[in-house]
Amino acid sequence: MEWFAAPGSWMGRLLFQRGLAALYVIAFLTAVNQFRALIGENGMLPVPRFVSRTPFRQSPSLFHLRYSDRFFAAVARLGVLLSAAVAAGAADLVPLWASMLMWAVLWALYLSIVNVGQTWYGFGWESLLLETGFLAVFLGNARTAPPVLVMWLLRWLLFRVEFGAGLIKIRGDRCWRDLTCLYYHHETQPMPGPLSWFFHHLPRPLHRVEVAANHVAQLVVPVALFAPQPVAGVAAGLIVVTQLWLVLSGNFAWLNWLTIVLALSAVVPASSPPPAFAPAPAWYVGVVLAVTALVAVLSYWPARNLVGRGQLMNYSFNRLHLVNAYGAFGSVNRIRQEVIVEGTDDAEITGNTVWKEYGFKGKPGDVRRMPRQFAPYHLRLDWLMWFAGISAGFAQPWFLPFVTRLLMNDPATLRLLRTNPFPDSPPTYVRARLYVYRFTGWPKLRASGAWWERTFIREYLPPVTLSSMAPTDGQA
């Protein structure tokens, strides 16, 4: 069975597994903290309503069997505890079958959440976490050498993530081809970070170098992942460097960190001779061979997607989110439009009505507030508010239920926000307005402390009351 094992990859496997488990902790913790307002029984897009109209075969999930907020919280908290235990090394202290079971439970629990998460869980990194987590089930633990086939499957996944992102850019927005996309991207990306203002103000020639380097990193370097070592390790190392650059320049939940974790499985050489491993059991070899064959068959669709003209971005070809298509920023916005939500407790709206703004944790609002770092934690509401600013169509079906809950001072919804201007009693009216946001320059930042400047465009949602919103609550 020498062909089956890759003992020299033991350190890469170790770092990959511990890093992946840590990201599972964050993903489950995000679910614990946010689910009640988003998909809970009284949430904006309730799970009970979703499962009542969606068959199990279309969204396999434990919550088709039973749903309550208490049960969902128990599932998510179990995910936090189990992934934390695995990150601490628990899976290396048990027999191989038990280790595989621990990883399988993590995957099944998170799949159950994603498949009922609806719009709130419609991000590419959800599928990436599930596909990566599925492969982790078959990597073995400290008692067995890493199976070479699964290590190659991880490289195939990393290749699709990077190469797919590179192709969607070249095929998509012209600014990727003329090297000008980063004139805009740092300012218009979904959730800028604390360094995004500084990245935006880099000299334009350097922005062009950044874009060119990105094309090399995503279209050339991934091919070298399939070369012998040390070439594959160098390629993976370059991917890690480029992902860290993205970590510094914005907030993309756990996308960048998960890509780094995947790359670490190939980039880290063993610093010492590998430990002694027990021979792989025959049943384990059989399972790995079967999974490899399954991935090979399922790879037909994403491979065809890569070479096809109508390339899909962040698309799952099956309900288990296995062997998906990936990509990011096939187009780049030239301006940043933000939806600003305000309320008032005046009984009637007059020319003297004072409107108070709701503050979000991550998305721009107060022009003097420096953008914050949240990734790898995922602020789901803030991300969808960015989409809502692009087009009102992206605000369906969750925005009106969100406004309704603000008019009720719903505690679960308010916990998703940074500030509530009506702590004592609900507002009588809530409205939303659309602004263009732009980063200020050095002189204005020094003079006023404002990181942003904004210009009013139009009314996004006219002032509404709770009585006017009740009939549309939760409808689409």
Image (cartoon, helix red, strand yellow):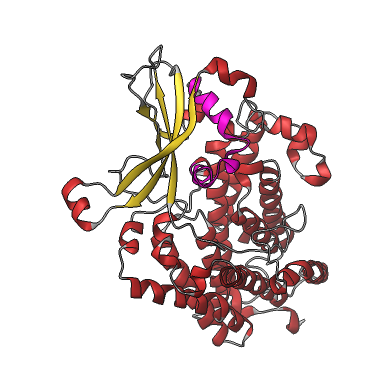
Residue 243 sits above or below residue 358 on the image: below
Q: Is residue 303 above or below residue 107?
A: below
Front residue of 210/121: it is: 210
Indicate the position of residue 447 as horizontal and vertical percent values. Answer: 16, 49
Residue 268 in sight here? no
User: Residue 152: percent from the left, percent from the top?
Assistant: 68, 76
In the rendered structure, the answer to whether residue 441 lies left or right of residue 321 reads left
**Residue 458 horizontal side relative to residue 312, left or right:** left
Q: What residue span does the magenta drawing correspond to? A: 382-407
Q: Left or right of 459: which side holds 169?
A: right
Question: 102 or 51: which is nearer to us?
Answer: 51
Q: Residue at x 35, y 74 (%)?
A: 206
Report the label total: 0
Residue 9 shows up from this direction: yes
Q: Residue extending furthest left?
A: 447
Q: Is residue 387 magenta?
A: yes
Q: Nearer the viewer, residue 146 or 107?
A: 107
Magenta stretch encompasses residue 55 = no
**Most foreground residue, 200 or 270:** 200
Position above or below: 329 against 237: above
Q: Quadrant of residue 328?
A: bottom right
- Measuring 44% from the left and 16% from the top, which residue is drawn there? 428
Residue 118: horizontal and vertical position, in percent?
66, 42
Q: Quadrant of the C terminus?
A: top right
Q: Position of residue 379 (x, y in %)?
A: 49, 44
Overall secondary structure of the magenta stretch?
helix
Q: Quadrant of residue 162?
A: bottom right
264 versus 71 height, above or below: below
The quadrant of the image that shows the N terminus is: bottom right
